[in-house]
Amino acid sequence: MYELLILSILMRGTAHGYLIASIINDIIGPYARLSNGRLYPLLSKLEELGMIGAIKKAGKNVKGDRNLRGYEITDAGRERFHELMMDTTSNPGEYRQIFLQKVSVLRFLKPSERLYLIDHYINYCQAHILHLTAEREDLVANKGFVLSPSHLSSTLNVMQHLIDQWQLELDWAGSLREQELSQAKGIGVI
């Protein structure tokens, strides 16, 4: 996910390491943090792979005046960004979080690609709702196997909460789809 975040930031323009870390930490925080010990090796790896290029620019650093090492995305980085954006099969358990990061940079994709990703996420949400609903119904039908009535009630309550969360995600994704369709019709794509 960090690779996608870094490339997403650089798709918007050049940035130095401190700014990249700050943006990522704002996105993933408040309890998760991307350390410098993890960021700078990843930046070096992306640079070695030719996905980003380092540029030196004068400017103020947090610790005073000195040359900042900025980064910009390369053509290879743009290709990798596109590949990561269109990937819907890696990390299926984390796809909800990954999709949330993709939404802010969907504009870098073609309208048909944006719709594809949104439709995939709609299906992803529906699959979670169907799975949880079926499992909840099985628990009720089997009287929770050996669960005590209070444990069964608590479990069913949590499952319903998860279903409700996924329904909210589904509703939001549906609104994204409607916005995308409206924009595509406005520019004559559909």
Image: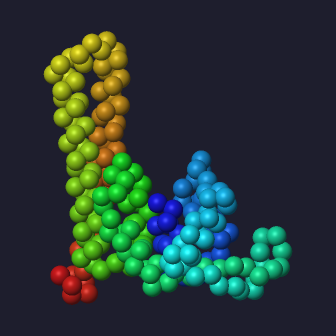
Residue 89 spot, x, y in % from top left: 30, 58
In this view of the protein, can residue 110 be seen by the observer?
A: yes
In this view of the protein, can residue 174 be seen by the observer?
A: no
Residue at far right of view: 64
Residue at screen point 22% across, 47% down: 127
Q: Is residue 120 above or below residue 183?
A: above
Residue at far left of view: 141
Answer with left or right where residue 43 lies relative to residue 138: right
Q: Quadrant of residue 90 in the image?
A: bottom left
Residue at screen point 37% across, 53% down: 91
In this view, the residue in front, 49 or 31, is: 49
Colouring convention used in this rendered image of the protein: rainbow
Answer with left or right where residue 56 lies relative to residue 78: right
Quadrant, the C terminus: bottom left
Residue 145 spot, x, y in % from top left: 23, 16
Residue at screen point 65% across, 80% down: 70
Residue at screen point 38% across, 68% down: 84
In this view, the residue in front, 85 or 125, is: 85
Residue 149 spot, x, y in % from top left: 30, 13
Q: Is residue 71 above or below residue 130?
A: below
Answer with left or right where residue 82 lies relative to residue 45: left
Residue 188 spot, x, y in % from top left: 21, 87
Q: Is residue 47 above or below residue 55?
A: above
In this view, the residue in front, 166 or 79, is: 79
Q: In this view, does 139 lie above or below 37?
A: above
